[in-house]
Image: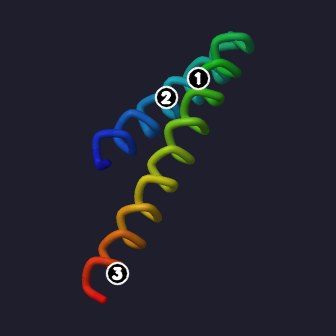
Amino acid sequence: MGNLLYWAVVFLVVALIAGFLGFGGVAGVAVDGARILFWLALVLLIVSVVLGLVRRA
C-alpha cells in the first residue's frame, strides 16, 4: 500500500509542476491519477484493518 501512496504523491507533484508551467490538461490528468490512487490506498487500508480485526475476534 505504501507503493500506491508513493505514486499518488508522484502524480500530485507532476500535476503541480505541470500546472505551474501552464500545461492544464496534463495537470488535470495527473491530479485525477493521484486522486484515484489515494482513494484506492485508503480503501485497501480500511479493508486490511477490518480483516485484521475480524481475524482477532
Residue 2 % position (x, y): 29, 49
| Residue occupying image coordinates x 70% and y 21% | 28
Q: Foreground residue, 10 or 57?
A: 57
| Residue occupying image coordinates x 46% and y 37% | 8
Marker disc for residue 55: none
Q: Residue furthest left?
A: 56
Q: Residues within 10 Å of mark 2 (few under 14, many from 20)?
A: many
Alpha carbon separation for disc pair 3 and 2? 32 Å
Q: Is residue 19 above or below residue 25?
A: below
| Residue occupying image coordinates x 50% and y 24% | 14
Q: Foreground residue, 19 or 29?
A: 29
| Residue occupying image coordinates x 65% and y 28% | 32
Q: Earlier in the sequence, mark 1 or mark 3?
A: 1
Residue 55 % position (x, y): 27, 77
Q: Earlier in the sequence, mark 1 or mark 2?
A: 2
Q: Is residue 31 above or below residue 42?
A: above
Which element type, helix, strand or loop, lies under badge 1? helix
Which element type, helix, strand or loop, lies under badge 3? helix
Q: How is the image coloured?
A: rainbow
Q: Nearer the viewer, mark 1 or mark 3?
A: 3
Q: Earlier in the sequence, mark 3 or mark 2?
A: 2
Which element type, helix, strand or loop, lies under badge 2? helix
Q: Are marks 1 and 2 in contact (CB under 8 Å)?
A: yes
Please, what is the three-letter code of the amino acid marked with disc 2? Phe
Q: Residues within 10 Å of mark 3 (few under 14, many from 20)?
A: few
Q: Nearer the viewer, mark 3 or mark 2?
A: 3
Kindly identify which residue carries mark 3. 53
